[in-house]
Image (cartoon, rainbow, N blue to C red):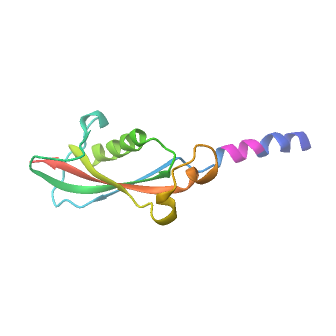
């Protein structure tokens, strides 16, 4: 019986860990836009130079050590559900001491969670 407990406890710990990403979106558009069939149809643009409308905001909560390209992919998936053509204006809420310190790869402050927020837009 004790052997079984020592085998089950580590498995419970592994499967009850936090998820890496928590994705949330806020729809701010008055119109309804059809969802995109794939996140590949949504592009990330640092600066948009053509007419557009913001249809919502996407927030990804994750650990600071996650690569930005993976965070963008999570945002693009959610933007596709909203029906957006692009995401832009990504910023984070890391502030104060945490913003000044670089994320550590092993333990340390890299596992502190931060919110990354982007605008989901459709082109006119």
Q: Residue furthest right?
A: 2
Report whether 38 appears left or right of 95: left
Q: Say which quarter of the image contains residue 80.
A: top left
Specify whether residue 1 is in view: no
Q: Is residue 95 above or below residue 65?
A: below
Q: Where's residue 90, x and y in %?
A: 32, 52
Report whether 22 appears left or right of 56: right
Camera-side residue of 34 and 74: 74
User: Which residue: 21% across, 55% down?
Assistant: 55
Q: Main secondary structure of the magenta part?
A: helix
Report whether 28 appears left or right of 92: left
Camera-side residue of 89 and 96: 96
Report whether 42 appears left or right of 123: right
Camera-side residue of 108 and 35: 108
User: Which residue: 45% across, 64% down?
Assistant: 95
Q: Residue furthest bottom?
A: 96
Say whether residue 74 is magenta.
Answer: no
Q: Where's residue 22, x and y in %?
A: 46, 52
Number of numbered markers: 0
Q: Is residue 40 above or below residue 13?
A: above
Residue stretch rendered in magenta on the structure: 10-14
Q: Where's residue 39, x and y in %?
A: 31, 37
Q: Residue furthest front?
A: 100
Q: Is residue 104 above or below residue 59?
A: above
Quadrant of the frame with the N terminus: top right
Specify whether residue 14 is in view: yes
């Amino acid at each position: 019986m004790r052997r079984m407990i020592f085998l089950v406890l580590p498995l419970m710990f592994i499967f009850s860990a936090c998820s890496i990403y928590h994705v949330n979106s806020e729809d701010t558009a008055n119109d309804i836009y059809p969802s995109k069939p794939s996140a590949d149809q949504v592009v990330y643009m640092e600066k948009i130079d053509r007419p557009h409308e913001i249809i919502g905001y996407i927030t990804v909560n994750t650990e600071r050590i996650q690569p930005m390209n993976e965070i963008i992919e999570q945002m693009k998936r959610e933007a596709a559900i909203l029906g957006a053509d692009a995401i832009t204006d990504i910023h984070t809420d890391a502030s104060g001491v945490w913003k000044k310190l670089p994320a550590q790869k092993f333990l340390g402050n890299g596992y502190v969670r931060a919110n990354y927020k982007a605008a989901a837009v459709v082109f006119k």
